[in-house]
Image (cartoon, helix red, strand yellow):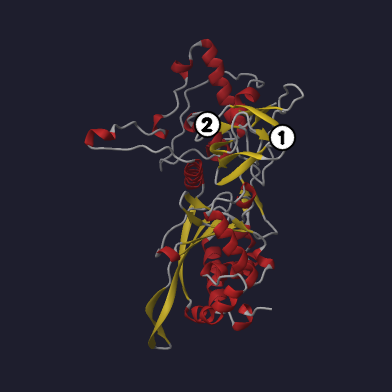
Amino acid sequence: MDVKLPQLAEGVESGTVVTILVSEGQEIKKDQSFMELETQKAVGSIPAPASGVVTKIHVKQGMEVSIGQLLISIDTGGGATTSPAPTKSTQTDGTARTNALAAPARLQAVPAPPVTDDYHYESKSGSLPPAPPAIRRIARELDIDLSRVRGSEAGGRITMSDLRAYIQRLQHLAHQGAASTTIAPPSSAATTEAIDFSKWGPVRREKMSPLRRTVSRRMTDSWTTIPKINQFADADITTLLALRKRHAAAYEKNGGRLTLTAFLLFVLGRVLKKFPRANSSIDEAALEIIYKDYFHVGIAVDTEGGLIVPILRDVDRKNLLQLSTELRALAEKTRQRKVSVEDLQGGTFTISNQGAIGGSYFTPIIYAPQVAILGVGQGQEKPVAIDGKIAIRTILPLCLAYDHRVLDGADAVRFLKEIIAGLESLAEADLKIG
């Protein structure tokens, strides 16, 4: 039996072999893990589909493998068979996701339109042509310069049909041997010029991990496709810290930890209900806003391998003890790289708290397809005027980064004020256990 890499989760196309748990000639049982694979931001094990003897290992530690690639062969005693080829799902949660590798095959079914001109999108601001993130991903993977694609919608916005037509023209011209004279090759601006840094001193190279590549790709997508605005504010958490000091020991005894992030999760469970746009996503293809009636908040966790954002679900339905307990367990699970791909999906809003490592004001990048993220710095004692008198208070710096296509400035101000009011008005009853 030839065992191939199956479809692990929606959107996961490949992974890197972390550990091979068996050796050739070893007996293996059905469902026994024979390999650990790092996919995107999670490390998971691959189970054997049948019992038998491992006759061949086709991959090595550190090798990157893709869906359908042969991993190991098992002699099941019943003749050589091949594990079924994996199928790929194209469902998404509100956004159009397309298999870029299969795109050319689908495009061949479209009649080749005539080549009319050497089009080039130009913007006075130098911005990229408007297009949904799904189209940008396909263009990047196929090395297509979107500025050469004529968009058919208002403002030159590119649709999937426009991209199909452009690729079909390229294929048509390639058959004629004239592609290089009619349509310009992909822009070299998207690639980094190779520089020999060793000319100036010793260097060392380290292959980007799947986690780092995922972070890089997603942050680039977010930065280039979302019109982001940052709104800053301060919260007085002096009273909140006094409450935490009085109740911290009781929470520790019950498995929780009263961190500032736990308080924020508790407050967000209420505030996001009052501001549904902050909990939404935008479907660019359909030009619709998708309102979600669930509240799953992502928590940015700093790990040795990089930033990982697991999801704490249904924050609106849980009390402070439940949130603090689940948050503690989820953060530890993430740092040990034991989170599953499912733990990283379905978030509706994100908190990035740098306070624990001393961060102050910063502007976080929105975790698409979400439309907002809250950046939290370290609380610091500062002199504050209260009723005409100066007092020393602990002030917490906050930054709300939001998608201006969905949220307006007034929405952001009101949203932040509601968060601040929630933090500053927490009472003994909110922290009571039992």
Q: Which residue corresponds to the image point at 53% horizontal and 67% vertical from the top-left? A: 261
Looking at the image, which residue sits at the far left? Answer: 200
Q: Quadrant of the C terminus?
A: bottom right
x%, y% of residue 98?
63, 35
Sequence-earlier tag: 1 or 2: 1
Can you say whether 216 is above or below 24 in the image? below
- Dividing the picture into quadrants, the one containing residue 106 is top right
Q: Is residue 203 visible?
A: yes
Q: Give the class, few, some or many, for how many residues have Cα within 10 Å of label 1's Cα (few <14, many ≥20).
A: some
Amino acid type, residue under disc 1 in the picture: Pro
x%, y% of residue 56?
61, 26
- Dividing the picture into quadrants, the one containing residue 246 is bottom right
Amino acid type, residue under disc 2 in the picture: Lys
Can you say whether 218 is above or below 252 in the image? above
Q: Is residue 364 left or right of residue 272?
A: left
- Dividing the picture into quadrants, the one containing residue 152 is top right
Q: Camera-side residue: 276 or 197?
A: 197
Q: Quadrant of the N terminus?
A: top right
x%, y% of residue 107?
63, 24
Q: Camera-side residue: 33 or 240?
A: 33
Q: Which residue corresponds to the image point at 59% horizontal and 61% vertical from the top-left? A: 329
Label placed on residue 49: 1
Q: Is residue 20 left or right of residue 288?
A: left
x%, y% of residue 327?
59, 63
Q: Camera-side residue: 313 or 398?
A: 313
Q: Is residue 313 left or right of residue 353?
A: right
Q: Which residue is mark 2?
A: 60
- Give the distance between the C-alpha atoms of the residues marked 1 and 2, in whole angstroms: 20 Å
Q: Which residue corresponds to the image point at 42% horizontal and 80% vertical from the top-left? A: 393
Label placed on residue 311: none
